[in-house]
Image (spheres, rainbow, N blue to C red):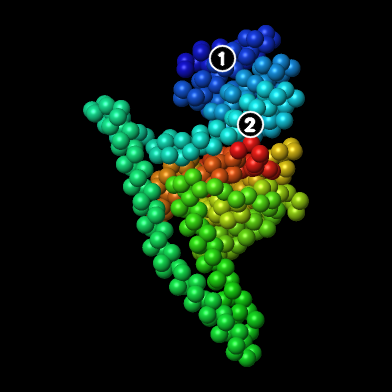
């Protein structure tokens, strides 16, 4: 889209003629779906769609419900929050269908766009030489091999962890029979058992990354999950004690979630934040806050004053297996994105500046809307 076309689209979204506005909203949805959109245009469209979600004409609000399906912006939850309980039944239905389809869109982001330009280039070369059918066949083979790798890795690791879990259980029982064993020793054994259980749950989530495994949700208070994520993330990072952790999560902030999956996502995000503060001349500060956003969503923010990321690194960090760390695997942030967006039907966005820090914003629905599935 040329700069002139972008300006014309934004102007059309601002017009007073409701029928023209509806057509512009539909055009904006097509642009978001089919074209590369720069950050400025995306932000402009997002702000206008947010405004139009309160338009007096239901036809416009319904068009907005369809258009935001492909909107990758922090405004998406706010738009949906306004129209998912709209007075008009047609608008409500369109908004709820968008929420359902959004999961599929997130899946496409993880397995399509997030694979990077290199893979897209290889697939394009296959299609040019052998046709579209060969491209689809190559993608199917790649997916099959990826799933097979995850399954085999899962079984190999479980084969090691299962006897370890049994050994820890036996150790706890034997310690309990010894007179005058300090309580803190028993606590160490129990804590190790809990960690093994958590690793098993993480492996289950890893296997679910490549499958459509249903997610079980329960109303969960965010503060205990955040506190456990901080403890687990800091426990295996050298120098983590030099980071000042500041929590601003009220006791009453809750959201329906899969506890282990949300915990895993937060551990990955917090660990990255702490590692970003390592080796800097200033003291590292990690700020985690959560607040209710309207009546339908909660907003969880994890911010650090670490090394930050360049624009290219920021784009690469959500690409599966892409990493700039010497010992990194390129799995943490993409998995966190999948756990938040696909499993919890939320959004995860990242802002970062070199030598300033990084802020991760997670928006989660308070209720998962089982009746809509």
* Residue located 42% across and 53% down the image: 328
How packed mark 1 is, by other alpha carbons closer than 10 Å (few <14, some 14-19, many 20 or more), is many
Q: Up-down: is 50 above or below 354?
A: above
In-front residue for pair 303/26: 26
- Please say if 300 is above or below 183: above
| Mark 1, residue position | 9
Say which mark, if any, is on residue 309.
none
The residue lying toward the viewer, choosing from 16 and 256, is 256
x, y percentage for residue 142? Answer: 33, 42
Badge 2 crowding class, 10 Å Cα cut-off, few under 14, some 14 to 19, many 20 or more, is many
Q: Which residue is mark 2?
A: 96
Which residue is located at x 66 percent, y 39 percent?
371
Residue at horizontal 33%, vertical 47%?
145
Residue 190 at x, y = what percent? 59, 74
| First-in-chain label (1 vs 2) | 1
Q: Residue at x 45, y 68 (%)?
A: 161
């Amino acid at each position: 889209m040329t700069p002139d076309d972008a300006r014309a689209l934004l102007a059309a979204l601002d017009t007073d003629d409701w029928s023209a506005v509806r057509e512009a909203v539909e055009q904006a949805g097509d642009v978001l779906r089919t074209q590369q959109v720069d950050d400025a245009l995306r932000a402009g469209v997002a702000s206008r769609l947010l405004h139009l979600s309160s338009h007096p004409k239901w036809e416009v609000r319904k068009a907005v419900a369809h258009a935001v399906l492909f909107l990758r912006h922090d405004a998406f939850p706010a738009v949906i929050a306004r129209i998912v309980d709209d007075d008009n039944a047609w608008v409500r239905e369109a908004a709820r269908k968008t929420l359902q389809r959004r999961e599929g869109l997130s899946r496409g982001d993880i397995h399509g766009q997030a694979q990077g330009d290199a893979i897209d280039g290889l697939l394009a070369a296959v299609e040019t030489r052998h046709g579209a059918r060969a491209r689809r066949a190559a993608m199917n083979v790649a997916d099959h091999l990826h799933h097979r790798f995850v399954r085999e890795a899962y079984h190999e690791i479980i084969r090691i962890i299962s006897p370890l879990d049994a050994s820890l259980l036996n150790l706890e029982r034997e310690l309990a029979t010894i007179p005058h064993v300090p309580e803190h020793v028993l606590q160490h054994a129990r804590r190790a058992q809990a960690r093994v259980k958590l690793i098993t749950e993480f492996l289950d989530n890893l296997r679910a990354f490549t499958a459509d495994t249903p997610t079980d949700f329960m109303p969960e208070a965010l503060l205990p999950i955040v506190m456990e994520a901080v403890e687990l993330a800091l426990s295996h990072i050298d120098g983590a004690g030099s980071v000042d952790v500041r929590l601003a999560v009220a006791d009453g902030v809750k959201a329906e979630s899969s506890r282990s999956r949300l915990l895993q996502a937060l551990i990955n995000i917090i660990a990255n934040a702490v590692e970003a503060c390592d080796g800097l001349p200033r003291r590292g500060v990690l700020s985690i806050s959560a607040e209710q956003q309207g009546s339908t969503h909660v907003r969880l923010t994890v911010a650090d004053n670490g090394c930050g990321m360049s624009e290219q690194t920021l784009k690469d960090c959500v690409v599966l297996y892409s990493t700039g760390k010497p010992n990194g695997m390129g799995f943490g942030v993409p998995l966190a994105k999948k756990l938040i967006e696909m499993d919890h039907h939320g959004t995860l966005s990242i802002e970062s500046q070199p030598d300033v820090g990084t802020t991760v914003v997670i928006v989660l629905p308070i209720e998962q809307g089982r009746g809509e599935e």
